[in-house]
Image (spheres, rainbow, N blue to C red):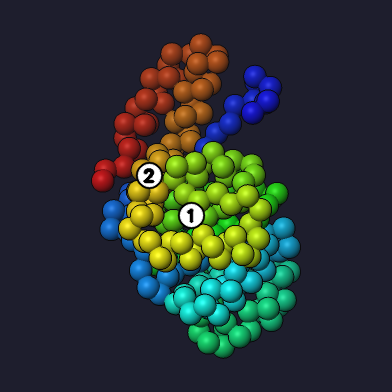
Amino acid sequence: PDQAEHIIPFFTSMMRASQVERAAAVAATKGIGSPMRVPYSGMLEPRKRVDALIDALHILTAEGLALEVNIVGDGPERTRLRERAAELVARGIVTFRGALPYDESLRWFEWAHAMVLPSQHSEGWPKVVAEGMCHGLLCIGVAHGQVTRMLDGRGIVLSEGSPAEIAGALRAAAQDPDGHQPLMRAAAEWAGRYSLEGLRSALGALLAERWHAPGLAARAARLRARQAPTI
């Protein structure tokens, strides 16, 4: 909102078309089970607020909710976060996986049921949310940047992302997994439109429109036709 007319927002993903197709097959059978499987994927630094997620896990495990959590990524907060989650690590609830190659990190979305992005101010178009959505996860994020637009009708948007608010969203999902299925299906359908190749063709179409170059538009249309995933 309130952007200058020459600024055009673009949604995209780091996933290739072949990865989007694989994710669509996973999403078609995705549901929320027990224990609930939750990944975090990203940098371990203060602005990402992984400590809020860990505190939410403490709340939920104290209530007896069964959880399995994998934290993928590295950064300056790694040692402090491991200390904060020490009890959960000792109980086998939380595992720190470290930084992984991109293709390997996507496997944790295949494994998961839901994901949380606790950051409040650091995200514009969070690609990790698009990747989780593409795999059919119940995605939970805090209202800022493009998160609200991405998750509107396709996930859960929190007002502040406090530990209690995160815990409440995960608790609600565990208590009513079937009721959250429409959000997960809508997320997968929407995010499945975006890939690196799709970004290339969309940029080609935009440039063709702005520069009045019909040859570029035709080429972009051919790229879209070749790269459309089959489900």
Residue found 55% across the figure and 15% down from its top: 210
Q: Which of 216 and 203 lies nearest the eye of the viewer?
A: 203
Name the residue type under label 1.
Cys
Tag 1 secondary structure? strand
Q: Which residue is mark 2?
A: 186
Q: Residue at x 48, y 34 (%)?
A: 200
Q: Secondary structure at mark 2?
A: helix
| Pointer 2 local density, CA inside 10 Å: few below 14, some 14–19, many at least 20 | some
* x, y percent for residue 190: 40, 41
Q: For this rendering, which residue is in front, 109 or 173? A: 173
In the image, 180: left or right of 155? left
Residue 141, image x and y in percent? 57, 53
Please report the residue visible at 42 percent of the width from the left and 56 percent of the height from the top: 137
Q: Tell me if residue 137 can be seen.
A: yes
Residue 151 or 103: which is nearer the viewer? 151
Mark seen at residue 139: 1
The residue positioned 72% from the left and 58% from the top of the image is 47
- Name the quarter where the N terminus is drawn: top right
Q: Which mark is residue 119?
A: none
Q: Residue reaching furthest bottom?
A: 90
Q: How many C-alpha atoms fall within 10 Å of the one at disc 1: few (<14), some, or many (≥20)?
A: many
